[in-house]
Image (cartoon, grey):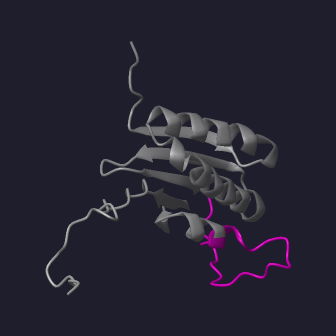
Amino acid sequence: MHTQSPPEVVLQLLAEPERFAAVRRVVRAQLEDWGHADLADDASVCVTEILTNVHRHVDSPECELRLRKLPEGGVRVSVGDRSPALPVWHTEPDWETESGRGIFLIASVADVWGVTPKRGGKQVWAQLRQPSPPPPTEPSGSGRCGTGAARRQ
């Protein structure tokens, strides 16, 4: 018998690059368990970019990763850290530099993202939703004439 995991998972971790691959595996496994395997790549990008920002810009690597299954479909990933400094978002990053693209990448894959100030720090989050299925289309060449159809005379 398979038991569904809870709708939110919280992990205490260190934002150290050598641990990022393991964190991505955890994210992927959890999203697969929730039935959101198709969101795992984008969620992993978001988590990795947020953790990279913690590693580069926060004095302490200690942080908290939250993965939440959204009731309306999709997931929310967030990382809380101990710095009140907010991330900087560039509408068009400098692709020639080695840094400064993290928030831009998050914004490009997430449906919505943001920062929530917390006592003693902040939480950077991103929400990803399941892609909507395409609307049904009428098969072409059905042989039916609609109103206003041209008639051969």
Query: Is the N terminus in the top left, top right, bottom left or bottom right quadrant?
Result: top left
Range covered by the magenta-colored residues? 82-104
Quarter holding residue 109: bottom right
Rendered position, 115 above or below 37:
below
148 or 67, nearer to the observer:
148
Where residue 89 sits: x, y (%)? Answer: 62, 78
On the question of residue 119 being in view, the answer is no
Q: Residue at x 66, y 37 (%)?
A: 25
How many numbered markers are drawn? 0
103 or 56, nearer to the observer:
103
Q: Residue at x 33, y 64 (%)?
A: 141
Which secondary structure type mostly characterizes the magenta part of the structure?
loop
Side of 12 where 34 appears, left or right: left
146 or 79, nearer to the observer:
146
> Farthest residue toward the front?
153
Where residue 6 sits: x, y (%)? Answer: 39, 32
Side of 146 where 137 appears, left or right: right
142 or 44, nearer to the observer:
142
Rendered position, 146 above or below 59:
below
Where residue 107 sits: x, y (%)? Answer: 57, 70
Q: Residue at x 64, y 59 (%)?
A: 50
Quarter holding residue 53: bottom right
Query: Is the C terminus in the top left, top right, bottom left or bottom right quadrant?
Result: bottom left
On the question of residue 150 being in view, the answer is yes
Queried whether the magenta region covers residue 93, the answer comes back as yes
> Farthest residue toward the top?
1
Where residue 105 sits: x, y (%)? Answer: 65, 68
> Farthest residue toward the left?
147
Q: Residue at x 38, y 20 (%)?
A: 3
Rendered position, 132 above or below 6:
below
Queried whether the magenta region covers residue 42, the answer comes back as no
